[in-house]
Amino acid sequence: MINERLAGILADSFFKILLPGLTVTIPLTVLSFGFAMVIAVALALVQFAGIRVLKEFARFYIWVIRGTPLLVQLFVIFYGLPNLGIVLPPFPSAVIVFSMNEGAYCAEVMRAALEAVPEGQMEAGYCAGMSYLQIMRRIVLPQAFRIAFPSLGNSMIAMVKDTSLAANITVTEMFMATQRIVARTYEPLALYLEVGLIYLLFSTALAKLQSIGEKRLAFYGRRRG
């Protein structure tokens, strides 16, 4: 009887957990990672260009963001800013925090990738009459993205799991949906294992896409070579 009850709870809760995953967790991940890449590329380019003031700002930003917990950053934005008269809804707050946090980590990945591009590529671009911005856009950045792609893919997979922290600021994503079902059914072990399985499915799908992307980039790189 207990097993039948538990099976019924799991079957009923699966889509109630999966739906917030598709409508909140995945959009939150995609939006946050997209903005994070904008931040990361900007910070990496600033450091690569060696503009002293901007480089120091970039290093300070990365130092602060990487040195403080993601959960604290979420609380500062969502619960702290209202003291300054700035009130943000839960979902935009989560997007801002995840973007800023992931942007700092990905900035270091992109910086290392930019530095891995041979210096001769810059010289060849200048010899071809290109400006600095043209060289970066047409030559250096495409190569840097190919180098950084595996690490960036891993970061995106990690972000899918980190979005569970958004439940702490009332974002109704998969983990919060699970918590609500647990509070009603008193079956924490089975339900938390179930949501863990759904996170695993999402991560596996992203890992597969990452693998396909890496193969295509490798093929493209060989053709150009």
Image: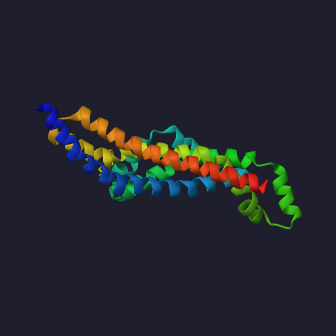
Q: Residue furthest right?
A: 127
Q: Residue furthest left?
A: 1
The residue closer to the viewer here, 201 or 80, is 201
Q: Position of residue 46 (x, y in %)?
A: 68, 54
Give the colouring mode of the picture.
rainbow
The residue closer to the viewer here, 64 or 99, is 99
Q: Is residue 61 shown to the viewer in this render?
A: no
Q: Position of residue 218 (x, y in %)?
A: 68, 49
Quarter of the image with the N terminus is: top left
Classify residue 154 by image quadrant. Answer: top right
Total label count? Answer: 0
Q: Residue at x 76, y 49 (%)?
A: 117
Q: Residue at x 37, y 59 (%)?
A: 86
The residue closer to the viewer here, 193 or 88, is 193
Q: Position of residue 63 (x, y in %)?
A: 57, 41
The residue closer to the viewer here, 144 or 103, is 144
